[in-house]
Amino acid sequence: MTDHSENNVSDERLTRAGHSRRDILKFGSIATLGAVLGGVALPGRAAPVLAQAGSEGELAPNDPLDILIVNYDGGTLLDFAGPSEIFHRLPNTNVRYASLNGGSVTLEFGVVYGKTERLADIEKTDVILVPGGSNLAAPMRPEYQAQIRRLADSAKHVTSVCNGSLVLAATGVLKGKRSACHWAFVNKLSEYGAIPVPDRFVEDDNGRFMSGGGVTAGIDFALRVAAKLRGQQAAEFTQLAIEYDPAPPFHSGHPRDARPEVIAMVDKELPGASRGLARIPGVR
């Protein structure tokens, strides 16, 4: 049984240190978290050893990293909000947002997001991320496709979340590459020459191409990207700082777990979903 007096002692020590959860999230560094905890032994856990080496990332700690998130009308907020929460907390990492014309975009459900840069004004980026959406008509337009392909060709890492992989695949950049996608659309990847993989995270060419499954998979995806580029310790710190400790109330997040009647409801809303061939505006 947990010793409640130990809980109280730990809480008091943290309070006296004058640090709060907001401080941890604001400063977003391993050094900050280490100073805050100061070796406090949390109930039921060993004292944190933050100097312990995790797997190394591709980049040295001081190497700059530029990440570009493509935005467009009809996009899904959580597809990129989850990853951006991770990426913004990585050291020496610059996260940018861009759309075809710059300014604001109107996402799914009428959410207005901006101010974004103009895609044409961005010369290159280390990582390009294309999120998905409920309507892909905008990013499937030739003008969008040309800019996405241009930036993807020179990027070190080409990534997507949800059916954003369909947008990338339509540019031709994923031809012959393995890719994830939302389960309802995953098999449409093959129509563009990509190889559909029904996993939550997929990589090809030793991580040059990385993709996440549907919507919420963006957080898992981003943590894996973070570990690959900045190392496991940086990724684990970020996961802890944002308290990403999922405990879904229902096991209904994928057709392999959902009840048949619930799958049927989605199929009615998105015909062809259970075959991975649901139709979406903007995709032939």
Image: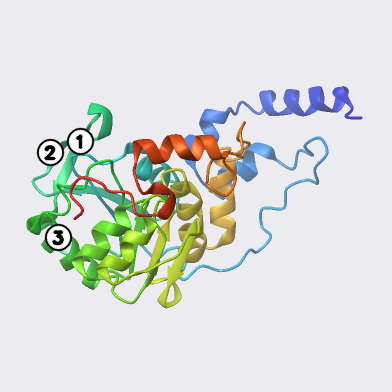
User: Which residue is painted at 11% across and 49% down in the image?
Assistant: 100
Say if residue 241 shows up in the picture.
Answer: yes
Quote the CA–CA distance across marks 3 and 1: 20 Å
Q: Which disc is residue 93 wearing?
A: none
Disc 2 residue type (three-letter): Gly
Q: Can you tell which quarter of the image residue 173 is in?
A: bottom left
Q: Are marks 3 and 2 in contact (CB under 8 Å)?
A: no
Q: Give the crowd class for mark 2: few <14, some 14-19, many >=20 residues within 10 Å.
A: some
Closer to the chain start, of discs 3 and 1, is 1
Q: Can you tell which quarter of the image residue 17 is in?
A: top right
Q: Give the crowd class for mark 3: few <14, some 14-19, many >=20 residues within 10 Å.
A: some
Q: Are marks 2 and 1 in contact (CB under 8 Å)?
A: yes
Where in the figure is residue 156, as x and y percent of width and height?
32, 71
Q: Give the structural element (helix, strand or loop) at label 2.
A: strand
Q: Give the structural element (helix, strand or loop) at label 1.
A: strand
Q: Which disc is residue 145 wearing?
A: 3
Closer to the chain start, of discs 3 and 2, is 2
Q: Can you tell which quarter of the image residue 146 is in?
A: bottom left
User: Which residue is painted at 26% across and 65% down in the image?
Assistant: 169
Front-most of 261 and 7?
261
User: Which residue is painted at 17% across and 51% down in the image?
Assistant: 139
* Residue at the disc numbered 1: 114
Front-most of 259 and 239?
259
Q: Give the structural element (helix, strand or loop) at label 3.
A: helix
User: Which residue is painted at 24% across and 67% down in the image?
Assistant: 152
Of badges 3 and 2, nearer the viewer stands: 3
* Residue at the disc numbered 2: 103
